Image (cartoon, rainbow, N blue to C red):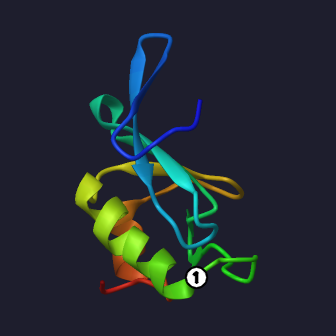
Amino acid sequence: RWLADGDTVQIGNETLQVRHCPGHTPGHVVFHAPQIDRAFVGDVLFAGSIGRTDFPMGNHQDLIDSITQRLWPMGDQTVFIPGHGPESTFGRERQSNPYVGGT
């Protein structure tokens, strides 16, 4: 089945919340595990960078909005696991990421 914003997915003992985060692609979703302060963000956000938006129907402003309106509220302490590269925290990226720092 297709996943929608607000759905939950059970993996073992963990319940992941589905968050729609368009921009990189229009249907991109992030999986948030609030009980362990983790978010699996795919290609939305990276340590020191953000996802590409040059794919068909990718949209730079939607990506920035997804990060600032959908990811940041998960909390500065939340560790995110990107689709590529090292993990980081939302707090660290809010302070130092050149694309979304200070937002």
Q: Which quadrant would the C terminus be assigned to in this image? A: bottom left
- Name the spot of residue 12 as percent of width and height, x first: 50, 11
Q: Residue drawn at (63%, 73%), measured in percent from left and top?
A: 51
Which residue reaches farthest front? 1
Is 13 left, or right, of 73 in this rendering? right
- Name the spot of residue 98 as percent of width and height, x first: 50, 88
Is 87 left, or right, of 18 in this rendering? right
Q: Residue drawn at (58%, 66%), measured in percent from left and top?
A: 26
Q: Which quadrant would the N terminus be assigned to in this image? A: top right
Is 74 left, or right, of 11 in this rendering? left
Q: Is residue 82 above or below residue 14?
A: below
The image quarter in which residue 44 lies: bottom right
Which residue reaches farthest top? 12
Give the residue pinned by disc 1: 59
Q: Label 1 neighbourhood size at 10 Å, few (<14), some (14-19), many (20+)?
A: some
- Name the spot of residue 24 as percent of width and height, x first: 62, 70
Q: Amino acid at mark 1?
A: Asn
- Taking depth in this image into account, of 70 and 46 the one nearest to the observer is 70
- Taking depth in this image into account, of 65 and 74 the one nearest to the observer is 65
Q: Is residue 96 above or below residue 18?
A: below
